[in-house]
Image (cartoon, coloured by chain):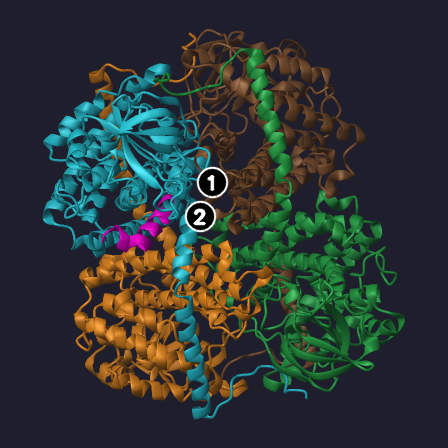
Chain colours: A brown, B cyan, C green, D orange
């Protein structure tokens, strides 16, 4: 809600965005969160889970469009298709979306479509936009981004191995992909696929290309879906997919051969802000549930309500601090993207990427613990929320890769700070002479 | 394996136990772990998951009995039915069992049957033993322990509310139970049930009774199964059960009315050792998997194998230390139980109860992180293992309850240590006089 | 430096403040930090440490005034004596001051004088201002704030016991104070003293008064100085002071009897921002030193420079994140004070109070560890910095008191969020009916 | 006290050791702890701190010898000079010694003399023993071990640079040493010094030698003492020492040129046990002080005694668990040394080296926090204790070096566990065929 924007950021949020933010909040709280259990129930059981999508989401989408909530993620100034919000402003909305399983899709701001639409809007040609961006922006189809592979350390994208070979007017693809999120949904019609088109190029960052692969292209097999702590995330799902002599017309190439790296780098910045703000929303929701629990008059272990236990109050306070600090880190990154683009905000984005999931997991885990058995079960949104956010410490590169990169970048200041400190030491030496005083030297008088 | 017993404990382990331990290890590594995926596959999908049990477990049981591995949990000297191992010795075996999903049941040492057999062996009369203990010890039926309730803070057992009313020769039970683990299995024939038989008794620890309720007694409804993160643990399951006018003959009462507290207290000690040692086994297995992963020559992010990354090596080392410290805490508790019984080992058992799951979760989470996406999925045993052990921080009372209790117990030393320190201060004052020296007083000379 | 202001805050910083910030940075880096070791050396040894103050500070003060750096802490709009900076703007300057032991005093922004000047400016009458505020603002004298007492839990100010009794035109004071920081300095001329003037007042928040006590009033004894991890902080010092029939004219009372609480509450907000931002400066400096260390070509354990060790790079990255998050929390609080005053920013101030010292201690401790033995010794500023910041987790109330208060405040949302969640559950129930779908119920078909 | 020995270890402690342990406890509690403040006061101020040693220690030594408490550290079976205790038994005693600043020296078990006596007993020739071991064992002189150097990463001992050149019958030493602990004491007569005697030897572990250097040898200058946080540890002290053409007769070489590595490796094992057990004693003492504090009826923040605050009780409980786990790790290592020698116990010693200081620091820091200002000051033993133990994370190699080494050692199992897991996977595949069941494959039916 607009009155919850941190004061440090509030003067950058337009009146229109504040108004929209209030509408988002109301829509999420009153429409989406109540619809979440219906969504789960409509998925069904067994094989049925993958052959349809819950109808409740279609009704939510109709409602959202009526309210003017649609595609808010496309940032003002960066995309001509944008409804006019900055990354900061959409970030604040995404926090509310993060409280509900259905909300992001309801307003057509769900991953991986968001990043895929950004790719198409930014790098697609007109034909590609017409064919794929338009229905995606209309919420008529869905999409997947196929990058991660099972047999290599995909956090280092130069390791990607799916083979792309030119054959006449086609590219022929062979290889394996997994964690192809969204590939389970029958509405998923397009795979934006990264592969290696020029494996012997001396520049390891020119070997990759990104190509548009229709989901029904012959030669594609979805072998299975991967689970996340027991959850299958149907009908969305995380696919393990095989490509066997999959032929795609050369016109499906995005930007051109060898430009895959450029594309995936352009894709990452805002998406990380979205994930981060949704995670903060999930953490806020977990804190709300924890507050509900500790005020439950039926829960009185050892004669006191949970809210009277000092340990629990400390959990509440620490959760408040951790969420608030994490949110400021993300909003600061969002503003930096708004001002300098994602390339100018690498440090800030990385900080958000690493800090937010850990903070959110802490908060959610405390909420789980306060609920006892209900916390790990289907009776609260907590366990599912925890499992999903746990994957963010792995997705788009594990924390450790980002920390190493950040450490190396920060360390570039090494020579400069060494020079400064040495200059300060030299200046001290001069001052010792000038003030005719000797350095403090504890210890016995020198024995010679 | 016997050569892995910590040196501090090794001289308390009999030659026979060492030999058995080696057999356990071999059986787990060569038979049970390979059978785990078959167990999962045989469960099946949808409703089918709850209508049978995987046949592979029956074959493992036959094999285990042939090897002499059966009911090792029943401690020597405490139960005449014991095969002759101490809690320490069985604890060492339980560590191996903890590496496999099927192993504990294969050797008839699976919870909650173990605790239930202990109850029956310790407190059951001959008829009760004949009817329920015998088939349980033979591995012919399974059992559940019904204590936790959804509407109260069950960590404080005085809150239990299932009503037991005497009516003629019967007790009539009404109420709700949940987290009734094992109730999903078609072989589960007996519910050892705690309820309130004397709610107005002025002694809050005499209001409860424990009674034996056959699973097919009319009036019992299994409403649903609770999930743990996304796992349903079929066919075992965690039931949410309603009792509506459930009639049980008075002869099914254990020990006698009002003795429920006594019984549940007698049940907890060794079971916590079993859980703890199995968790340590799961942590060891996670460490093994992590070692496999970091030595995988195909995983070379940024040109180095994972085992060459210092951060990962530190994870390995910390995991080693945390596991080893946790194991010593458990073994020390097991020995204390062996020597003084569970009542004499309350502090040591509580230490194990709190420390071990947290250590194991740390280790397993690091292993997950080292695997990336495979870690959270079905492709490693890690995510399932993590979810199961996470519940141990809640089951039998959340960590926080145990920590408060331990804090209060430790604080009983408060008056004594205060007296000691004050005596020491007084003795110092005397010495100042005797040595004619003044206390160090930093600061300016007193201004008067 | 102005180019390091987080983007989220930069548009609230005036051009004048940015210019001043650059001057502050230059002054601290080029004048104050080099002067720090001279300051230490000029203190001397033994009793001499308390009989003078280092002359280097006087020279720095002359230089600072020339540069226009003086009393910047007095916030624009809150004090007519203000040089015109907001709390946000001064906060950014305080970060630089925090890198040097001498800088804060050099620009007359050192605690506890800052808080004391705020008290006098806000609550003092003209005569009091003339006598004490003027020389304090001129940097001619120094001051102490006497609140904490050795024999009670002073974090709860109602426990304060120093007795104030009216006797004719005087108040007569008896009691003990400690942690009277700054009382060691010969220039410290005035003690702003809190005591109990009306111990039987039924309102526990009206029992206290604040009175101005000249340091040379008869009956005052400085018994000794307290050390902080071995440091005596001479000549400043932390005094343990006895009051024995100390007579002070009634005109020295601030605001009036019974208004002590009001005064100390008004004193706390901005001071916590100052401490927090100085701590962040100390953390940044520690990170700089760590970078120097890990780039030292002479330090090559096991054949690699420290900067090539992944664990160290992770420390650098985590330090960067923790500092940046902590800074945003403080700046957000500073802006809230600027806009709503300290009373409107209680939550934000408390977040900074708790988060910042812990973050700074983490960073400094990592830097110490990277230096090995040099880190704990006098050869780096790290150990002294750590010790000083460690006291911030205790001063003005330990972390735990603030966390409890924050927890209770956050929990005030308990009823509201419970209502919201229950409303959402009811709405779900309606939707289940509307969509004619049943809740997901894992488990076997009900056995009846 | 003997009744506090963990049950897991008690059957390895002889009756004589138990009796002695009780005497140690009584001596520490009734004599040494009261003498600690006298020791501090007798040190005095300024230069005086380094020109004498407190006389109270001499009286304690007389008393200790009368009680038969002398040189207990020299392990039975390893040294013919031993009074007959195992490393385990002395470890239990060292825990009590760790509660007092004076106790270890009082019973002639103070570092670095202990390690130095071990070196002389194990590697010294008869003349060396006569000249130096005898007076050390009699407590007549003290000693220092000079290894660490300021300009290199000394954690990697191959970096040591102090030059040793043969010149006729002498070795001539040039270079710098620091952290030469004990060098401040006027009784310190002998420096056991490591240097590089053969810098071009192709085997980097044969370049070093250890030689005995009388403290009064010409050419030696103690430049200064290093502080630990603000403590100078006078009269013991941590010296920074310069060697300029220091001539030592060749007969002072220990074992022979090039055997320095062998000697320092032999010196480390038991000393780490001693440090670790003393740290555990310091942690126990901190816990005792914390209990005193939280039971102080005068400390009642917000109307409750500290012992009634749940957060504090949790600190007490966690401290109990951490201490107990750490103690078991050390005792297990001590037993392993007793049985296999230090070389056979490398893993266990490293575990203790890393785990114990961190556990002790946690406990002591909590105690400090519970005391508020008194905790960081001279009014409790806590701050001094914390500072001393903090150095143990650096001394003898920082934690990180040990963790890397442990990680590498543990990783040696990598190939074996990979083979095991792969064998288990192959066995599973066979079982799938045998049981005619397909692997669980969540997800939609394959689209071809």
Residue D219 versus residue D15: which sits nearer the camera?
A: D15
Quadrant containing the N terminus of chain B in the rendered view? top left
Quadrant containing the C terminus of chain B in the rendered view? bottom right
Query: Mark 2 — residue?
Result: B400
Relative side of C89 to A436, left or right: right
Q: Residue at x 58, y 49 (%)?
A: C322
- Could you tell me if residue A274 is visible in this image? no
Q: Which residues are magenta?
A: B341-357
Q: Residue at x 20, y 17 (%)?
A: D434
Q: Residue at x 47, y 54 (%)?
A: C305
Residue at disc 2, secondary structure:
helix
Q: Is residue A191 above or below residue D315?
A: above
Residue B12 versus residue D417: which sits nearer the camera?
A: B12
Asked if both marks, 1 and 2, belong to the same chain, the answer given is no
Within-10-Å neighbours for mark 2: few <14, some 14–19, many 20+: many
Residue A192 versus residue A169: which sits nearer the camera?
A: A192
Residue at disc 1, secondary structure:
helix
Query: Mark 1 — residue?
Result: A369
Q: Chain of mark 2?
A: B
Q: Is residue D371 above or below residue B343?
A: below
Q: Quadrant of residue B252?
A: top left
Relative side of A432 to A365, left or right: right
* Mark number, residue D212: none
Q: Chain of mark 1?
A: A
């Amino acid at each position: 809600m607009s009155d919850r924007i941190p004061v440090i950021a509030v003067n950058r949020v337009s009146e229109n965005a504040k108004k929209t933010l209030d509408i988002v909040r109301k829509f999420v709280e009153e429409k989406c969160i109540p619809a979440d259990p219906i969504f789960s129930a409509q998925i069904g059981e067994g094989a049925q889970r993958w052959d349809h999508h819950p109808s409740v989401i279609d009704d939510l989408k109709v409602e959202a469009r009526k309210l003017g909530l649609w595609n808010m993620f496309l940032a003002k100034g960066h995309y001509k298709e944008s409804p006019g919000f900055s990354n900061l402003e959409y970030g604040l909305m995404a926090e509310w979306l993060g409280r509900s399983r259905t909300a992001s899709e309801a307003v057509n701001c769900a991953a991986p479509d968001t990043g895929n639409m950004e790719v198409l809007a930014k790098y697609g040609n007109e034909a590609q936009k017409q064919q794929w961006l338009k229905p995606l922006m209309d919420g008529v189809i869905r999409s997947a981004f196929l990058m991660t592979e099972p047999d290599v350390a995909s956090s280092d994208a130069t390791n990607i191995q799916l083979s792309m070979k030119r054959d006449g007017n086609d590219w022929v693809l062979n290889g394996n992909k997994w964690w192809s999120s969204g590939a389970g949904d029958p509405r998923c019609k397009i795979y934006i696929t990264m592969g290696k088109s020029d494996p012997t190029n001396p520049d390891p960052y020119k070997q990759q290309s990104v190509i548009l692969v229709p989901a029904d292209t012959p030669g594609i097999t979805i072998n299975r879906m991967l689970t996340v702590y027991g959850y299958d995330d149907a009908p969305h799902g995380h696919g393990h997919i095989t490509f066997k002599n999959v032929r795609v017309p050369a016109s499906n190439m995005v930007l051109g051969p060898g430009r895959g790296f450029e594309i995936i780098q352009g894709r990452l910045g805002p998406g990380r802000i979205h994930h981060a703000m949704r995670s903060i929303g999930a953490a806020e929701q977990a804190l709300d549930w924890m507050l509900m629990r500790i005020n439950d008059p039926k829960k009185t272990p050892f004669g006191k309500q949970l809210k009277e236990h000092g340990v629990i109050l400390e959990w509440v306070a620490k959760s408040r601090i951790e969420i608030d600090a994490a949110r400021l880190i993300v909003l600061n990154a969002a503003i930096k993207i708004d001002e300098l683009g994602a390339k100018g905000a690498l440090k800030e984005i990385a900080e958000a990427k690493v800090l937010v999931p850990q903070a959110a997991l802490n908060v959610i885990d405390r909420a789980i613990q306060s609920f006892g058995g209900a916390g790990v079960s289907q009776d609260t949104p907590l366990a599912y929320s925890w499992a999903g956010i746990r994957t963010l410490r792995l997705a788009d590169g594990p924390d450790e890769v980002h920390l190493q990169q950040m450490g190396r970048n920060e360390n570039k200041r090494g020579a400069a700070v060494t020079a400064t400190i040495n200059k300060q030491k030299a200046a001290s030496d001069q001052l010792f002479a000038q003030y005719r005083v000797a350095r403090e030297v504890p210890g016995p008088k020198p024995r010679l």
